[in-house]
């Protein structure tokens, strides 16, 4: 795989009006999503749910790629086709989450470092053989009085860069996901400052590890007021602050920025993305989505684990995918 083909895949993922479905929930996370609806988290239920999303008619108009979890990339649909082949047959690019999760950071009780570098080269080769063309690694940063610390910023940036270099070596496009959580009472200024610092640190490490930025994508949080902050920034302010922060910290060689939704409502996540693309600024990168909850909340609720609800659930998913596809072009009307 050449640098040119990595760049081509990255560009295809952020083709006009398209974005990513993040369906890479680990076992504890998918259980957390299923539990409130009384759906048991069995292998068969997880497969049925994800197959239902992957088969949704016309989703390929708005969804360019899907991030899978280790179990899913090895699963077969009810008719025996592999889920990877199912996605490929629809022109949707399969990707895979390769991090080992956020684990306690030594000496820093309230912070985490994402683990998973040991043995990563072999796992990446395995995933490439299974049909993955891109990968994802998520680092998590919590905001509070004294955090994130320099230790947390540096450990996570280093791991993200080592991961990205290994992914490119294996011919896979790395999605670099540094997520500053929206939990907390902090205001939008703090989120802005921390996000900029995180991104600057990540790109400094990517440069040290000689990662080819043209063959990468960034998956960041938006610049938002903390969830429990008394003063919530408007849609326009979020759009302006997020774009300004990214312009300060993300190199122009990166082809696309695909936001995570991070606990925003699905409607908010769409409106914020739309407002950014409507600013009319000439930006070096595409701005699109790689949403988990903001794409899945409605279809999961509509499905509720029942076969008879598949049509309604697929429609609910398609409605969210279409709305976000339009937002990626700045053409969404609520
Ligand atoms: C879909 O959730 C992903 C996996 O999370 P865990 O490893 O914790 O199970 C997550 O990384 C996701 O891709 C991003 O956070 C974006 O999802 P949201 O829901 O924030 O848009």
Image (cartoon, grey):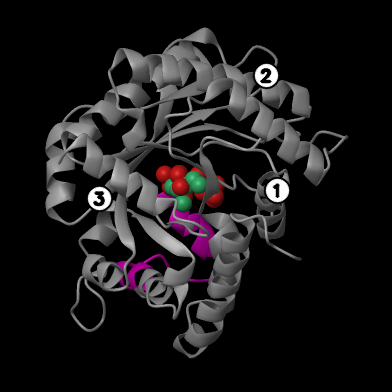
Residue 122 falls left or right of residue 84 = left
- Asked if disc 2 and disc 3 are in contact, CB closer than 8 Å, the reply is no
Q: Find the residue positioned furthest to the right.
A: 231
Q: Which residue is mark 1?
A: 272
Q: Residue, x 28% and y 23% (percent of image)?
A: 162
Task: Pick the quarter of the image with the N terminus.
Answer: top left
Among the two numbered marks 2 and 3 on one chain, the one whose residue lies closer to the N terminus: 3
Q: Is residue 105 visible?
A: no
User: Where is 165 relative to 208, above or below?
Assistant: below
For the stretch drawn in magenta, the main secondary structure is: helix
Q: Quadrant of residue 114?
A: top left
Instruction: Pick out the residue farthest to the bottom.
Output: 308
Residue 133 numbered tag? 3
> In terms of depth relative to the viewer, which is nearer, 257 or 145?
257
Is residue 199 within the magenta segment? no
Q: Which residue is mark 2?
A: 193
The response on whether ligand 1 sits within 8 Å of label 3 is no
Of the numbered discs in the image, which one, if any, rests on residue 155? Answer: none
Q: CA distance from mark 2 to mark 1?
A: 19 Å
Q: Earlier in the sequence, mark 1 or mark 3?
A: 3
Estimate the x, y position of residue 102 in percent, counting from the top left.
42, 32
Q: Does the residue at mark 1 contact the one at mark 3 (Cβ under 8 Å)? A: no
Q: Secondary structure at mark 3?
A: loop
The segment highlighted magenta reads: 25-47
Q: Of helix, strand and loop, which one carries label 1?
A: helix
- Identify the residue shown where x is 68% and y is 53%: 274
Q: CA distance from mark 2 to mark 3?
A: 33 Å
| Residue 277 image point, x, y percent | 66, 48
Give above or below for 132 relative to 188. Answer: below
The answer to whether residue 257 is left or right of residue 185 is left
User: In the structure shown, which secondary structural element does the residue marked by tag 2 occupy?
Assistant: helix
């Amino acid at each position: 795989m050449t640098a040119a083909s990595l760049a081509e895949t990255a560009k295809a993922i952020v083709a006009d009006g398209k974005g990513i479905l993040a369906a890479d929930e680990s076992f504890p996370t998918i259980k957390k999503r299923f539990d409130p609806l009384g759906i048991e988290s069995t292998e068969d239920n997880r497969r049925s749910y994800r197959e239902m999303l992957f088969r949704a008619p016309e989703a390929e108009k708005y969804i360019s790629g899907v991030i899978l979890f280790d179990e899913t990339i090895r699963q077969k649909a009810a008719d025996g086709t592999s889920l990877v082949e199912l996605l490929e047959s629809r022109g949707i690019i399969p990707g895979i989450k390769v991090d080992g999760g956020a684990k306690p950071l030594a000496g820093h009780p309230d912070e985490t470092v994402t683990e998973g570098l040991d043995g990563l080269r072999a796992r990446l080769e395995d995933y490439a053989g299974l049909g993955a063309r891109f990968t994802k690694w998520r680092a998590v940063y919590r905001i509070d009085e004294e955090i994130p610390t320099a230790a947390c910023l540096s450990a996570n940036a280093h791991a993200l860069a080592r991961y990205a270099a290994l992914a490119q070596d294996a011919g896979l496009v790395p999605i670099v996901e540094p997520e500053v959580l929206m939990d907390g009472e902090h205001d939008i200024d703090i989120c802005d400052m921390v996000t900029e610092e995180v991104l600057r640190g990540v790109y400094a490490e990517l440069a040290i590890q000689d990662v080819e930025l043209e063959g990468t994508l960034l998956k960041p949080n938006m610049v938002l007021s903390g969830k429990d902050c008394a003063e919530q920034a408007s849609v326009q302010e979020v759009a302006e602050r997020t774009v300004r922060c990214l312009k300060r910290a993300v190199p122009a060689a990166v082809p696309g920025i695909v936001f995570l939704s991070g606990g925003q409502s699905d409607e908010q996540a769409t409106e914020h993305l739309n407002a950014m693309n409507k600013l009319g600024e000439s930006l070096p990168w595409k701005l699109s989505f790689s949403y988990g909850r903001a794409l899945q909340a409605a279809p999961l609720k509509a499905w509720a684990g029942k076969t008879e609800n598949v049509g309604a659930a697929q429609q609910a998913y398609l409605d969210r995918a279409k709305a976000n596809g339009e937002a990626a072009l700045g053409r969404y009307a609520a």
